[in-house]
Image: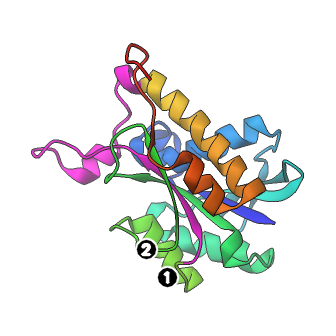
Amino acid sequence: MHLIIGLGNPGRRYEKTRHNMGFRVIERLSEAHDIPLTDNRFDSVVGKGAMGGAAVLLAKPQTFMNLSGQAVRKLFDYFRIATEDVVVVHDDLDLPFAEIRLKYGGGHGGHKGLISVMQHLGSRDFSRVRMGIDRPTAREDVERYVLEPFAPEEKDRLSMLLETAVEAIGEIVSSGIRTAMGKYNGKAIKNFNEEV
């Protein structure tokens, strides 16, 4: 079974913010694969189902971003998931907006949600789906920036990026992270008026 975790913050206040990219991908996966997110346990909202014939567990930790690892560990232990079958979806300041990057293992890049997951799993050996949100301008505070909603002119590209993430996760589940990396890494969602 694959455990697919979207990182974010619970509550209406944070729903549409840049920091909640992980939650939004999990919601799109839920819709695309008819996996209802109706179970509230292990400090998470979860849904159990299948993608392409493979068993998956979708999860949105409800512990707030910086404590995500607490919820992830509970799911990991109860469902006896192998670390190589964990997929974590998160926003990434180091990628341009609307770019996706898949990765296996490695560091946390200062992302507090990832730091918590690594600490509680005691491992870095899991897959990540990094969703580019770009960096704020030099004058804007990073914490404030990630907790702001996307600008209206970003909405179309955001929707396409979320759909691409759903496809990429399907590839991870069906073909493995290496194949998915070769297919999706560095994929940037262009403006509609740009040549693709």
Q: Is residue 131 magenta?
A: yes
Question: On the image, numbered disc 1 is attached to which residue?
Answer: 119
Region in magenta: 125-154
Query: What residue sits 51% from the left and 35% below the top?
Result: 161
Quadrant, the N terminus: bottom right
Name, please, the residue furthest toward the bottom: 122
Q: How many marks?
A: 2
Q: Which mark is residue 115?
A: 2
* C-alpha separation, residue under disc 1 versus residue under disc 2: 6 Å
Instruction: Report if residue 58 is visible in the image.
Output: no
Query: What residue sits 18% from the left and 50% below the top?
Result: 141
Q: Amino acid at mark 1?
A: Gln
Give the answer, above or below, for where 12 lies relative to 70.
above
Q: Is residue 149 magenta?
A: yes
Q: Which mark is residue 182?
A: none
Name, please, the residue furthest toward the top: 193
Q: How far across and how far down the image is residue 196, in percent? A: 44, 23
27 vs 39, left or right, is left
Q: Amino acid at mark 2?
A: Ile
Q: Are marks 1 and 2 in contact (CB under 8 Å)?
A: yes
